[in-house]
Image (tube, grey):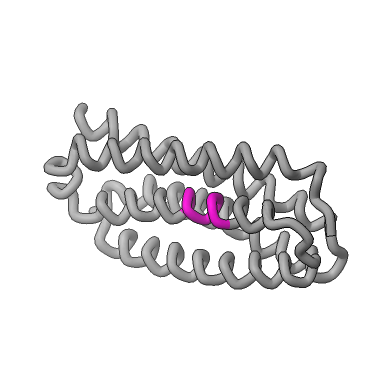
């Protein structure tokens, strides 16, 4: 199988995910005392790292030459289900521990997490059924994951200091 048309896209997303992961680590390091003073904020930082790690791992796997569609579909499906389960479980825990005045705001965060992860599962299933067409479903998952992670990085770097 040949993904030459997608090569540059996955190189770019892997690099961007790695850079943003570093940004979140810097944000956490700079504001560690304030972050730890909020019960669930360290978990939110972890969720952002997981979203970015998901992009990084899947983009890296897509760069491995000569893989079959079946192998790619299985890899993406396994990783996506694991990440989805982890993030959904953490979201539930964070939501339960969130003060009632912030629950509505956190529901929006949960929605973005769902919207960023479900396209990966859809992509994997479509890749297994109809091959390359499923790859297009990775794009919204990656873009929404980037948006969610940048928003979380902003909270960890800027909003926490207001």
Extreme residue in the front direction: 65
Q: Is 35 left, or right, of 139 in this rendering? A: left
Total numbered circles: 0
Task: Note whether 144 is above or below 98 in the view shown.
Answer: above
Extreme residue in the right direction: 130
Q: Is 122 left, or right, of 151 in this rendering? A: right
The image position of residue 101, as x and y in percent, is 27, 47
Query: Magenta stretch: residue 54 in it?
Result: yes
At x 20%, y 29%, the residue is: 161
At x 45%, y 37%, the residue is: 19
At x 79%, y 64%, the residue is: 127
Q: Is 131 left, or right, of 154 in this rendering? A: right
The image position of residue 146, as x and y in percent, is 52, 41
Q: In front: 145, or 72?
A: 72
* Dominant secondary structure of the residues highlighted in magenta in the image: helix
Q: Quadrant of the N terminus?
A: bottom right
Identify the image quadrant of residue 78: bottom right
Task: Note whether 85 is above or below 107 in the view shown.
Answer: below
At x 60%, y 46%, the residue is: 142
The image position of residue 109, as x and y in percent, is 43, 48
The image position of residue 51, as x and y in percent, is 48, 52
* Range shown magenta: 51-57
Query: Magenta stretch: residue 157 in it?
Result: no
Q: Quadrant of the C terminus?
A: top left
Identify the image quadrant of residue 160: top left
């Amino acid at each position: 199988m040949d993904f030459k048309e997608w090569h540059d896209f996955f190189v770019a997303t892997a690099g961007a995910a790695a850079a943003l992961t570093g940004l979140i680590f810097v944000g956490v390091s700079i504001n560690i005392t304030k972050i730890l003073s909020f019960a669930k904020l360290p978990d939110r930082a972890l969720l952002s790292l997981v979203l970015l790690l998901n992009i990084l791992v899947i983009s890296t796997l897509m760069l491995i030459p000569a893989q079959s569609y079946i192998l790619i579909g299985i890899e993406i499906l396994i990783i996506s289900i694991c990440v989805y389960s982890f993030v959904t479980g953490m979201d539930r825990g964070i939501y339960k521990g969130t003060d009632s005045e912030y629950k509505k705001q956190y529901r929006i965060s949960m929605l973005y997490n769902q919207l960023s992860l479900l396209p990966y599962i859809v992509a994997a299933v479509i890749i297994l059924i109809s091959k390359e067409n499923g790859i297009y479903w990775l794009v919204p998952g990656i873009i929404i994951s980037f948006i969610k992670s940048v928003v979380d990085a902003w909270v960890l770097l800027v909003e926490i200091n207001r």
